[in-house]
Image: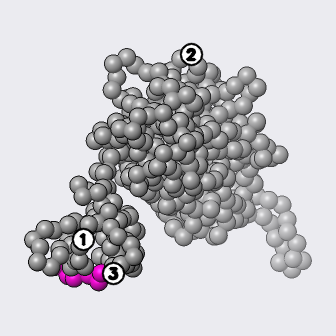
Amino acid sequence: MALPASQNQRYVPRVHILTRWRAYDPKRQVVGATYKRTCSWSEDDSGIVVLTNPSVDDVRVHDIGGGQLRLTAQGEFFSSGATIITGTSIYLPTAFDGRSVQFIGRAVDLMQSDELTIVGPTGQHGVFGIPVAEGKADRCRIDEATATAIPYPDGNSRVNVKMTMGSDYAYDPKVKPELASDGKPNPFVLIGSQVYGLRETPFGPITISSATATNQQDSGCTRNDSGTLTCQYSFVAPTTDIRNAQTYLVRDLAWNDMRYTGLIHFLPSVTELARTTPAKKDPQSDLRTQPPAATPVDFSVKGYDLQKTIQCSGNAKPAGPKNARLPPDPTWVTPIVPDEQLCVFIAGGDFEWHVVSPTVATLRVSSQLAQNPTLRLQLMSNTYKSDWTRHVVWELPIPKDSTDSTGIVAIQMHRGDGGLITFKGTSFKTTPTVTFDGNALDVYVDPTKKAQIGVFVPSALTKNGGHKELKATEAGSTKVTMLPIDVLN
């Protein structure tokens, strides 16, 4: 049986059989008049095969904790034997009354599935999601979305997802929710195998900043003067996880095909500060006027997306709260415009910043600044220097001077490197014995070059990173000269 069901009709599949007696002439095989008082009826409870496709009018999504979601749909379903298919997973309804059906599923499975489908017992199926009016599919969806991640020194990133809805999506944040025809969007964000926006990974308030004021509001939507509806959602995520994933999916499970996938935009981050060989005087350097005792010190800075940084103009200290040692580190921040470069500011003195590659930059500071135990490097919006919520502060330990008391400069090597290295500044009269952890190393001495010695370093010595020292002793002498090596990760 195929019932005449449509979107706004309400039918429950019940069949009643009505019978009456009629006169019949067996010789002539002709049917006669109906006996009116012989009418009787009964309900057929032997089972009805319904061939009508189930249809959905509305869907509500509820977070029940533990990464589980409960989806409740209103519509025409006709049979409690319906099942819901999400990708390769099949869910049975937990409640059914003919006009509504609900089921519980894992949030990650629901987000990863292509579409949710409800299937009747005879194979008839329909989309489990709010349908979009005919002709509005392209204008009642997510038109555009961006995801911006701000890495912080604690290993987490503050992520902001901003999505722009289609022109036909009817929702006005200033109007009471019950009067809005489409309702407030309720998306989740999937990065890798983690869903954000759940109880365990909630969205947080957003800091809205302008040139004159800063205030916070809950994650939500605003409609500008031109009528464009924009929604923003912020959350905290492990930097390593989202960097490995690189992409995100934002999706409202209540709607059919309300989704958007894109690349995550990462702002710059710093991972390591290493002292390089002491720099010679550079006639082009802005620090060339420093006295000899204040010779500039060079560092190499490792990180990610460093090509998106520039030196803050004028080295001017950004404005901020008085008597504040560090700018506040809010749990939630407003991301800088994705296409904007961040400027680098070093607190405490003059500096020079040059980007070499997306993962390497060089930093030159005064010797006085290099005497501090840490270097405070601030990444900030070049446009909103006075907005401290847009600052990320990296406290980087300053490595010790690589030159020991004998004047021998440490050799920098990378993990797994091996071969002949030359130490300059030595004062050996004879060829010394060089050892590391009690193991002798081969030594090469060029008689034409004084004050230097060559040592063959095996790759096993540089297997692990860190500072290492070789011991050099001359025959008949108890003096031990340390030959330093810095193995970079």
Residue at 30% x, 81% y: name it: 443
User: Could you give the CA–CA distance between mark 3 and mark 2, rounded to whole angstroms?
Assistant: 67 Å
| Residue 53 can be seen in this image | yes
Residue at 26% x, 81% y: name it: 441
Residue 147 in the figure: left or right of residue 194: right
Query: Mark 2 or mark 1: which comes first in sequence?
Result: 2
Name the foreground residue: 23 vs 328: 328
User: Could you give the CA–CA distance between mark 1 and mark 3, rounded to whole angstroms?
Assistant: 12 Å
Residue at 33% x, 19% y: name it: 323
Task: Name the quadrant of the N terminus.
Answer: bottom right
Q: Amino acid at mark 2?
A: Thr
Q: Amino acid at mark 3?
A: Tyr
| Magenta region | 437-444
Assign a secondary structure to mark 1. loop
Assign a secondary structure to mark 2. loop
Q: Amino acid at mark 1?
A: Phe
User: Could you give the CA–CA distance between mark 2 and mark 1, rounded to whole angstroms?
Assistant: 67 Å
Q: Which mark is residue 428?
A: 1
Image spot of residue 349 (x, y percent): 41, 31
9 magenta-colored: no
